[in-house]
Amino acid sequence: MSDAQPASLEAKSPYELRVHLGDGLPEQSVRDALATGDMGFLHSYTTGSTVDGPGVRVVAWTTGCMWRCQYCHNPDTWTMTNGIPVSVTRAVEELKKYQHGLKIMAGGFTLSGGEPLVQHRFAAKLLAAAKSLRIHTTIETNGFYGDKLSDAELDTIDLVMLGLKTWDPARHRALTGQDVAPTIAFARRLAARRKPIWIRFVLVPGLTDDLDDLARTAEFAAGLGNVERVEVLPFHQLGRFKWERLGLDYPLRATAAPSPALIERALTVLHTAGLKAF
Ligand code: SF4
């Protein structure tokens, strides 16, 4: 199968709005891609990232997500066929270009999204290929489909960056549209396998800034024993234009970024639980 629009695979940043790039692909091809993982849908590749795992990273951003986070800054990645259809062979060839540079810079490859495990067969193949190139591998995931990866597939992943939003089930459903239980179960499975986790926590005033709730999340995370750090990501409005351009009703259009004092308070809660947090 040939890839469509190969010229636009690399992006300056994931904030580029991309839509309809996979439209027109026969439905059967989409089903085959999901079943075999021989082809996947990518929003883009970016290079030189220093915020998506250790060292300098090449990041592949997949399309498709089963959550609808109120603060999502990339809603164009929700729909899988907004991405570019890319064969796994081509995706690996792209990665090979950076193989030596990534080793020199102690970096690696990060598969992010969207939610990469919506395309779990493609994700498994791409991560295994990166591992066989001896490239450090990271997946950034919400963990909801963590059970789709076998233990052997998990072994090809060096680091999991897990988006843990809140401990409270009702709050989680309101925030993301989905249950928190699968994410918790995946975190426990990673702990049992001693797989390193970095947690990403988006701090949104009025939404995720309940410090009692954060304390319970922190207690859980600290108890796992494999959480190496928690990154507190202050909410921002960089994704607002995407909601507007896509004709979506953005619930956080009037929400401000958290104050430095609120960020400090959140960090204190995490430190108190014994976590490294930044
Ligand atoms: S899990 Fe990530 S991509 Fe999916 S809706 Fe939430 S923030 Fe957006």
Image: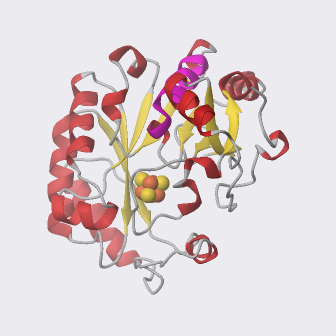
Q: Position of residue 167 (x, y in %)?
A: 19, 56
Residue in the image at 25% along x and 54% along y: 271
> Vertical placement of 63 versus 145: above or below?
below
Q: Position of residue 210 (x, y in %)?
A: 21, 71
What span is colored magenta in the figure? 118-130
Q: Residue 124 magenta-drawn? A: yes
Q: Residue 47 magenta-drawn? A: no
Residue in the image at 40% along x and 76% along y: 258
Would you say residue 74 is visible in this rendering? no
**For the C terminus, which image quadrant?**
bottom left
Would you say residue 161 is visible in this rendering? yes
Judge left or right: residue 167 versus residue 65.
left
* Quarter occupied by residue 196: top left
**For the N terminus, which image quadrant?**
top right
Which residue is most to the bottom?
Answer: 254
* Most foreground residue, 131 or 82: 82
Judge left or right: residue 252 versus residue 43.
left
Model colouring? secondary structure
> Vertical placement of 151 versus 28: above or below?
above
Residue in the image at 34% along x and 41% along y: 143
Whereabouts is ligand 1, in terms of quadrant?
bottom left
* Most foreground residue, 236 or 69: 69
Which residue is most to the right?
Answer: 7
* Quarter occupied by residue 165: bottom left
> Vertical placement of 268 versus 58: above or below?
below
Residue in the image at 54% along x and 33% along y: 31
Q: Position of residue 7 (x, y in %)?
A: 85, 43
Q: Main secondary structure of the magenta part?
A: helix
Judge left or right: residue 65 versus residue 96.
left
